[in-house]
């Protein structure tokens, strides 16, 4: 029997038999691994590239269940509308989608052609994973640690920003902005200078009686090789994130971690929008580092745009974020950071940002 995966460009041959979906470990089998990530405790039947949490620390906030694909007449069909799709024009995909997301009353269905299908249930407390037989384990881990975790956090009431945050000299601050604007590189530069990582890529927010705190993210960083060498000055070889990616994975928090990890939520002193420029160009204006405040509608617009996977949110979900962001900005100002590109300038950039953050009240 040939089964076409949801949205896939290819088909997979499976033996003909009655449809069946079973737990990988058998009904009632407890999760094999326990992790602390995004300020939550996760019990998982899928191994993730993270240090394991203490098994005696309490109940899990959400669970990842691995569902075996037995002899089937077809994969589970996402019960909802297609709300997002990414296509690729490379020879492998030839314009076919490699990511699809469906949304309906039954939750979120997130499919990736390197990993499989993940179903986030409506309450956010459980994720069912239908792993492709030929799944890349790195791609599956990225799926769970990225878009799946993002949807879980939204459903649990901890909406995340697309940003990286550190704690330096007792002060927490974050960098938010689109991919490629230097958020992780700046965070890595601070780690090399003694800061602790609060989060990379996904920055969960938690409302508190006094304002809004940033929760710890997953204890890992996703780094391009030049950042590993130039910002961290890390010489050891790091593993690839996935078989089809050249980005590297740096895991923190374990006994052999080279860099510290912040493990408790922290109030952000400030948020910075990085904007790099070429100091040698005529438009660059030299190597001057400038920090300018953004306020009012401009600041809210930036935070809305830098909500993690904002394209997966319904309009009413986006509107519900406005009071939280206004509360955050009342205590943690948003500031535009213009700085010269190049690792040689990072000492000055880090010193300037830290001085600015420490000077804010």
Image (cartoon, grey):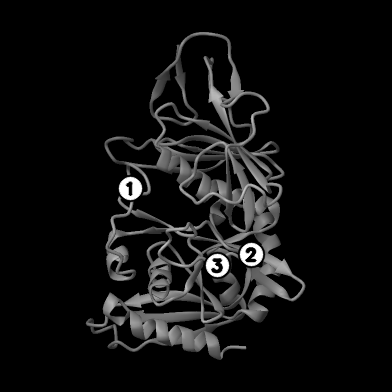
Q: Quadrant of residue 187?
A: bottom left
Given residues 37 and 8, the one toward you in this image is 37
Q: Secondary structure at mark 1?
A: loop
**In this figure, which residue is indicated by the disc labeled 2?**
205
Mark 2 surroundings within 10 Å by alpha-carbon count, few (fewer than 14), some (14 through 19), many (20 or more): many
Q: Is residue 334 left or right of residue 15?
A: right
Q: CA distance from mark 1 to mark 2?
A: 29 Å
Task: Please name which of the two marks, 3 or 1, marks the residue nearer to the observer.
Answer: 3
Task: Give the residue drawn at x 48%, y 67%.
Answer: 260
Can you say which quadrant of the picture contains the N terminus? top left
Look at the numbered discs 2 and 3 and tell me whether their residues touch, using CB distance below 8 Å. Answer: no
Determine crowd level at label 3: few under 14, some 14-19, many 20+ residues with C-alpha closer than 10 A: many
Residue 70, image x, y percentages: 53, 18
Residue 194 falls in image quadrant: bottom left
Residue that numbered label 3 is attached to: 262
Left or right relative to 218: residue 185: left
Q: Which residue was labeled with disc 1?
A: 245
**At 52% from the left edge and 82% from the top edge, which residue is drawn?**
169
Comparing 182 with 233, the one in front is 233
Q: Nearer the viewer, residue 194 or 65?
A: 194
| Left or right side of 105 for 268 | left
**Residue at the outermost bottom position:** 359
**Seen from this angle, which residue lies furthest right?**
209
């Amino acid at each position: 029997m040939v089964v076409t995966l949801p949205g896939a460009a290819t088909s997979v041959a499976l033996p003909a038999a009655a449809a069946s979906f079973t737990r990988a470990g058998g009904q009632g089998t407890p999760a094999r691994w326990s992790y602390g990530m995004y300020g939550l405790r996760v019990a998982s039947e899928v191994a993730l590239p993270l240090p394991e949490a203490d098994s005696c620390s309490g109940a899990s906030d959400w669970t990842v269940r691995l569902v075996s694909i037995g002899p089937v007449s077809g994969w589970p069909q996402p019960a909802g509308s297609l709300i997002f799709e990414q296509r690729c024009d490379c020879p492998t995909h030839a314009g076919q989608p490699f990511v699809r997301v469906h949304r309906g009353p039954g939750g979120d269905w997130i499919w990736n052609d390197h990993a499989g299908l993940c179903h986030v249930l409506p309450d956010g407390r459980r994720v069912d994973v239908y792993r492709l037989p030929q799944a890349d384990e790195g791609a599956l881990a990225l799926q769970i640690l990225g878009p799946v975790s993002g949807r879980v956090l939204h459903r649990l009431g901890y909406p995340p920003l697309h940003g990286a945050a550190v704690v330096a000299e007792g002060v927490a601050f974050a960098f938010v902005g689109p991919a490629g604007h230097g958020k992780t590189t700046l965070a890595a530069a601070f780690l090399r200078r003694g800061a602790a990582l609060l989060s990379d890529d996904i920055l969960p927010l938690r409302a508190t009686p006094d304002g809004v705190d940033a929760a710890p993210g997953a204890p890992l960083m996703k780094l391009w090789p030049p950042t590993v060498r130039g910002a961290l000055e890390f010489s050891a070889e790091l593993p690839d994130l996935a078989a089809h990616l050249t980005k590297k994975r740096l895991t923190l928090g374990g006994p052999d971690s080279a860099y510290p990890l912040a493990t408790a939520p922290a109030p952000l002193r400030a948020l910075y929008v990085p904007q790099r420029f070429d100091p040698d160009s005529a438009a660059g204006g030299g190597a001057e580092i400038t920090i300018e405040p953004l306020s009012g509608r401009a600041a809210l617009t930036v935070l809305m745009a830098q909500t993690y996977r904002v394209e997966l949110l319904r309009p009413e979900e986006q509107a519900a974020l406005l009071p939280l962001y206004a509360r955050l900005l009342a205590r943690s100002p948003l500031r535009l950071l213009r700085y010269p590109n190049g690792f040689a300038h990072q000492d000055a950039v880090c010193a300037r940002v830290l001085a600015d953050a420490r000077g804010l009240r």
